[in-house]
Structures are given as structure tokens and as C-alpha cells.
Image (tube, helix red, strand yellow):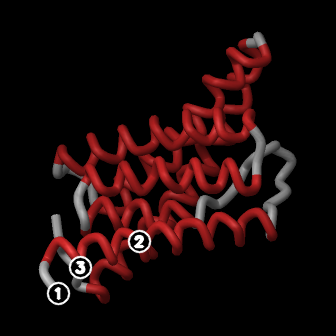
């Protein structure tokens, strides 16, 4: 198998894994009193992809995941919120990784925090109220904690998998 075939097979596996982890989160919703708050298990796959198959493929993976999950388990509103969160999250993780000043866990924390920031920005415009900004401190804490967990797990996977295409 040549390198390109391996990369395509690996990307397909990551898409399937991200989809399954998203489904697991749909089945086991975390109820902490904030609508839409989730651990973000599928972000493990995005972080691992960012470090193993490169930013372009990881971004494509993120887009495909958001579309598949939104169309399968959600509605149009969920798709918009998820897209905004995923885009801003990925952008910040890309910048964080490129800076080479953050560990994988630090990059994951950026992703977790800015996913929530992206969703709050959309909610502020959709609901036409800036009062939603008061949710942000709690969401930053949630994003930080889940980002740490996701980052640590991602780092363990990358160390053990030893897959490198990027």
C-alpha cells in the first residue's frame, strides 16, 4: 500500500471514529444546566488528526464530522452552532500548534474554549441578546477542563499509535 492510500484509509477511519464518538455523546448527554454543553469526545479525533495527518486533512475531517453529525442527529440550528464552534476551535488549534509554544494539551484547551466562544457568538446573534455573554465564564471553565482531558488522551494516542503522515 502506498503512502497516499494509507493516508486515505486512515482519514476514513478517523471520520468513522469521530462520528461514533459524537453519537455516544448524543446518547449520553451531559446535563450541567447549560444547553448544548458537552465533553467533546470527537475532538480527540480532531486533535490526533491535526498532529498525524496535517492541518488540511484535519480541517476536512472536522467539516465532514460536523456535517454528518448535524444531518444525522441534529437540525439546522445545531448545524449552524456546531459549524461556528468547530471552525473557530480549529482555527485556534491550528494557530496554537503552528506557534510551537503550546503542548498538545494546550492546543486542545484552545480548541475547547474557542468552540464555546464560537457557539456563544452565534447564539448572541441568533437570539439578539448580548446577555448570553454571561454564560462565557462557565463555558470557558468547561472548555478548559474538557480541553485538558481531550489533550491528554490525544497525546497518549499519538504516542502509542506512532502514525505520522504530516
Residue 85's spot in the image, x, y percent? 55, 39
Q: Residue at x 69, y 56 (%)?
A: 38
Residue 8's spot in the image, x, y percent? 29, 70
Q: Residue at x 42, y 57 (%)?
A: 61
Q: CA distance from mark 2 to mark 3?
A: 10 Å
Q: Is residue 147 above or below residue 125?
A: below
Q: Residue at x 13, y 81 (%)?
A: 2
What is the number of the mark on residue 1? Answer: 1
Residue 44's spot in the image, x, y percent? 47, 67
Quarter of the N terminus within the rendering: bottom left
Residue 137's spot in the image, x, y percent? 64, 35
The one of 159 and 57 positioned closer to us in this rendering: 57
Q: CA distance from mark 3 to mark 1?
A: 7 Å
Residue located beneath label 3 in the image: 6
> Dot 2: within a 10 Å radius of its alpha carbon, few (fewer than 14), some, or many (20 or more) residues?
few
The one of 92 and 58 positioned closer to us in this rendering: 58
Q: Is residue 108 above or below residue 134?
A: below
Mark 3 vs mark 1: which is more N-terminal? 1
Q: Which image quadrant is residue 99 in?
A: top left
Amino acid at each position: 500500500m502506498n503512502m497516499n492510500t494509507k493516508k486515505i484509509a486512515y482519514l476514513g477511519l478517523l471520520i468513522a471514529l469521530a462520528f461514533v464518538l459524537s453519537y455516544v455523546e448524543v446518547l449520553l448527554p451531559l446535563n450541567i444546566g447549560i444547553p448544548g454543553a458537552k465533553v467533546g469526545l470527537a475532538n480527540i479525533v480532531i486533535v490526533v488528526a491535526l498532529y498525524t495527518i496535517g492541518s488540511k486533512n484535519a480541517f476536512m475531517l472536522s467539516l465532514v464530522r460536523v456535517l454528518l453529525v448535524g444531518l444525522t442527529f441534529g437540525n439546522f440550528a445545531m448545524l449552524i452552532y456546531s459549524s461556528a464552534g468547530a471552525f473557530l476551535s480549529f482555527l485556534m488549534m491550528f494557530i496554537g500548534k503552528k506557534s510551537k509554544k503550546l503542548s498538545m494539551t494546550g492546543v486542545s484547551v484552545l480548541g475547547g474554549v474557542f468552540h464555546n466562544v464560537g457557539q456563544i457568538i452565534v447564539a448572541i446573534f441568533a437570539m439578539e441578546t448580548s446577555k448570553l455573554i454571561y454564560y462565557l465564564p462557565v463555558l470557558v471553565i468547561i472548555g478548559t477542563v474538557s480541553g485538558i482531558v481531550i489533550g491528554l488522551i490525544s497525546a497518549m494516542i499519538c504516542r502509542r499509535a506512532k502514525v505520522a503522515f504530516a
